[in-house]
Amino acid sequence: DEDLAVLDAASEDVDEITYLPALPVVAIVGRPNVGKSALVNRILGRREAVVEDTPGVTRDRVSYQAEWMSRRFTLVDTGGWEPDARGIDASVAAQAEVAIDLADAVMFVVDSNVGATSTDEHVVRMLRKTDKPVYLVANKVDDARLEPQSADLWSLGLGEPYPVSALHGRGVADLLDLVVGGLPEVSAVAKREVGGPRRVAIVGRPNVGKSSLLNKAAGEERVVVNDLAGTTRDPVDEQIELGGKVWRFVDTAGIRRRVHLQQGADFYASLRTSAAVEKAEVAVVVLDVTQPISEQDVRIVDLVLEAGRALVIAYNKWDLLDDDRRRYLEREIEQNLGHVDWAPRVNISAKTGRHLEKLVPALELALESWDTRIGTGKFNAFLAELVAAHPHPLRGGKQPRILFGTQASSRPPTFVLFTTGFLDAGYRRYIQRRLRELYGFEGSPIVLNMRVRE
Ligand code: GDP
C-alpha cells in the first residue's frame, strides 16, 4: 500500500498514547560526562531534546521512543542522574545492572580521551557476563586523528570499540546500523512464554506498600519454588499462587531489595519501574491513600499506558482512611486519574489483608481486556453504526471518511482505521469511548492508529 501514508493517531496530540507492542530496548550505560545525553540527543534527532546534565538533578524521563532506518525501538538512558564523585562506582554499577536486565542491547559509552577508568572496569566485568549484545562506544572522537586512541579500548575485552562523536554525529550512523541490525523484531525481554504464568509488575512510589502487598500475598498463599530446574527464569521474578493460579511477579528484587544508594534513589526506582513494566503484561499501580495523589503517581500510571500494558490501580492503606480524607481522595482521583477511569480499582490494606482477594479478579479482568480481539466484520459494523449516529464534523467543506477498519493486534487492542483524511482528536476519543461502552476493555489501553489516503 504505497499510497497510504502511515500516521500515528498520537503524533498529533500528546494526550493520546502511542504504542507499538514490545519494542526492542536499547540501554545506554556509562560514567558521568562521557557524553550519554549527547548520544541520546543524536539518536533521537530533533524530536526530543534531553536537557544537559546538571549534577545531582534527576531527569524525569528515562526512556524514549527512537527510530532508525524505519526500525523503532525504546532507548533507555540510564544516566539520568549523575552522582557526586563518591557515589559514582555504585551508581554506574546500578545502572549497568538495570540496563542488562531490561535491554535487548547495551551501548556502553567510554570517553576515548580519558580511556577506561576503574569505574569502567567494574561495569565491564558485569557486561562481559551478559549474553546480550554489548556495543563499546568510544565517544568524543571528533576527527580521524583521534581514532587510534580508541583502539586502546580493545583491552577491555568487550570487542571492537566504535569511535564516534556524539556531539558532531561522526560515526553514529554506522554504529546505529549495527545496533539496530542486531535487534530482535520484538523485545526478547518482553516476549511472553505461551502458556506460562502471567506476568505482573507491582509498581508505585516508595513507601506506598508494594513490598507489604507482595509479602502479604505471598505469605498467605503458597509461595511457589522460584527457579524450576532447567529453566532460564529471571531470578528476580517470583512465582506466587493466588486465587488458585500461579502468577509471576516480575522484578520483585526491585521491590524487596532496598536501593542502597542514598542519592538518586528515586531515579533508580524509576528505572526499576520501567524495567518491571516492560517485562510485565499487567501492572498494579499501588497508591497510598493517606497521601495526596502526586505527579509521580500519575507519571507511573502514564508509564504503564505508554508501555501498553494492562492496568489495575490499588488504593492501599485503606485502614488508615478517615471520612475527611476520603472525600478529598475521590476528588483527587477524578482530577488526576480521570484518564484511566477504565482501570479496575481495588481498595486494599496490605497490612490487614482487607480486600486482597479482589486483586486477582481485577488482574484477570484487565488481562482479558488486554487480550481481546474483535473480528474485522464486527468492528466494521461498529464503525458504520458509529458514523451513522455521529458523523465526523465537516472541516473546510470536506469530511474525512472512515473507509475501513481492522484490529491489527491485541495486547493491547490496537486498531487501524483507513481514512480519507486525518480524524480530529475529539473524534478519535469519541471512537475510543464508544469502543469502551460497547466492549468494556476495563483495565486495558486501546490504541487507535490511522492510515490516511492522501
Ligand atoms: P514500598 O516502598 O512501596 O515497598 O512500601 P512498604 O511495603 O515498605 O511500606 C511502607 C510503610 O507503609 C511500612 O511501614 C508499612 O508497614 C506501611 N504499610 C504498607 N501497607 C500498609 C497498609 O495497608 N496499612 C498501613 N497502616 N500501613 C501500611
Image: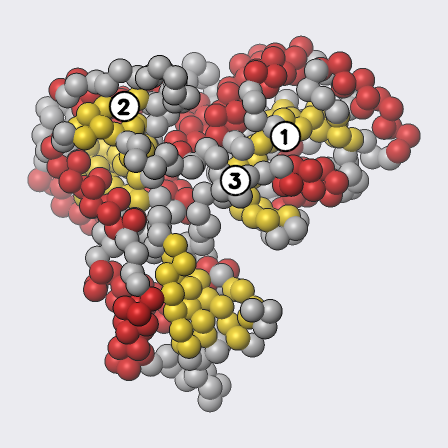
Is residue 320 visible in this depiction of the protein? no
Ligand 1 quarter of the rendering: top left
Callout in the foreground (1, 3): 3
Amino acid on which disc 1 is placed? Met
Q: Point out residue 306 in the picture as x, y percentages from the top left corner.
A: 41, 47
Secondary structure beneath label 3: loop
Amino acid on which disc 3 is placed? Pro
Q: Point out residue 179 in the picture as x, y percentages from the top left corner.
A: 65, 37
Q: Which residue is mark 1?
A: 107
Q: Nearer the viewer, residue 53 or 35?
A: 35
Instruction: Residue lying at the far bottom in this picture: please name it.
Output: 397
Residue 284 - label: none
Q: Nearer the viewer, residue 33 or 323?
A: 33
Is residue 304 visible in this depiction of the protein? yes
Q: Are marks 3 and 2 in contact (CB under 8 Å)?
A: no
Q: Which residue is mark 2?
A: 239
Question: What's the CA distance linking mark 1 and mark 3?
Answer: 14 Å
Q: Is mark 2 within 8 Å of ligand 1?
A: no
Mark 1 Cα within 10 Å, few/some/many (few <14, many 20+)? many
Q: Which residue is mark 3?
A: 24
